[in-house]
Image: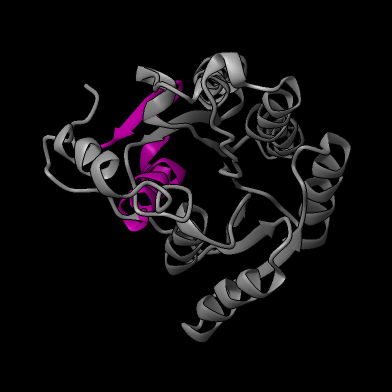
Amino acid sequence: MFDLTGKVAFVTGGSRGIGRATGEALAELGAHVVLTYVGNEAQAREAVDAILAAGRKAEALRLDVSDGAAAETAIAETAKRLGRLDILVANAGISIDALLLRLKDDDFDRTLAVNLKGAVACSRAAIKVMMRAKSGRVIFVSSVVGEMGNAGQTAYAASKAALLGVAKSLAREYASRGITVNAVTPGYVDTDMTTAMTGEARDKTVAAIPAGRTGQAREIATAIAYLASDEAAYVTGQTLRVNGGMYM
């Protein structure tokens, strides 16, 4: 099951956290993985080296997905160079937190540019390639915050909620072409983005999780790997919640 041998996967924000874990999981299943990063080349190289050391295929590519034209070019060129593109995992994201009355327009725009517009640009480019092959998997990494909201995260919640609507719309548009489009909504996962929360705030968050613990990036990656597989060919337009029961 879940054999991705010979397939090419493009994972944005793949140098750390959920993106890196996803790259590792897809590579273990046989995919040639392209991991994108914005600024930390050393971290991206470390992620790639770990995959290569395991005898799998991977490469790093610098890309700021908020530049839509650059994102589309990167994906088109990757597909041309490697001969195909089977899987897109739109994972790149940022969170600029602030209560609404303190939220700056520039921060709101930046959040949407990366989390939403960047993901849409990548999916547009990937679907162009996948349509020719009459097969493909597009997976958006949203968030539990996009479903339940969170004080101080209006911009982040808006961007992640919007991805769910995008996934459903694209699923309807391209199901007949053999392309599935789904979203994963991670809960509170131990990543660089969440380590800033400490003390009472962290304890309160964990207490609200029925599973009684935070999630691990690998657990999200496994869900993504399923959606990327042939076994998930009849799953499209869906939101797969991996949150320990935090939101049901």
Residue at x-position 58% and y-position 57%: 14
Residue 164, visible in the rendered structure = yes
Residue at x-position 41% and y-position 40%: 227
Q: Position of residue 189 (x, y in %)?
A: 34, 47
The image quadrant of residue 203 is top left
Q: Position of residue 64 (x, y in %)?
A: 77, 47
Residue at x-position 68% and y-position 38%: 130
The image quadrant of residue 205 is top left
With respect to residue 3, does 229 lie above or below?
above
Q: Is residue 117 left or right of residue 55?
A: right
> Which quadrant does the N terminus fall into?
bottom left
Q: Is residue 213 left or right of residue 223?
A: left
Q: Which colour style is shown?
A: one colour
Q: Position of residue 10 (x, y in %)?
A: 64, 52
With respect to residue 192, does 177 lie above or below?
above
The magenta stretch spans which residues? 217-243
Residue 235, visible in the rendered structure = no
Question: 200 or 24: which is nearer to us?
Answer: 200
Q: Is residue 240 left or right of residue 89?
A: left
Whether residue 226 appears in magenta in the rendering, the answer is: yes
> Which quadrant does the C terminus fall into?
top left
Q: Position of residue 244 (x, y in %)?
A: 20, 38
Whether residue 22 appears in magenta in the rendering, the answer is: no
Question: 75 or 159: which is nearer to us?
Answer: 159
Residue at x-position 41% and y-position 21%: 151
With respect to residue 31, does 68 lie above or below?
above
- The total of numbered circles placed on residues is 0
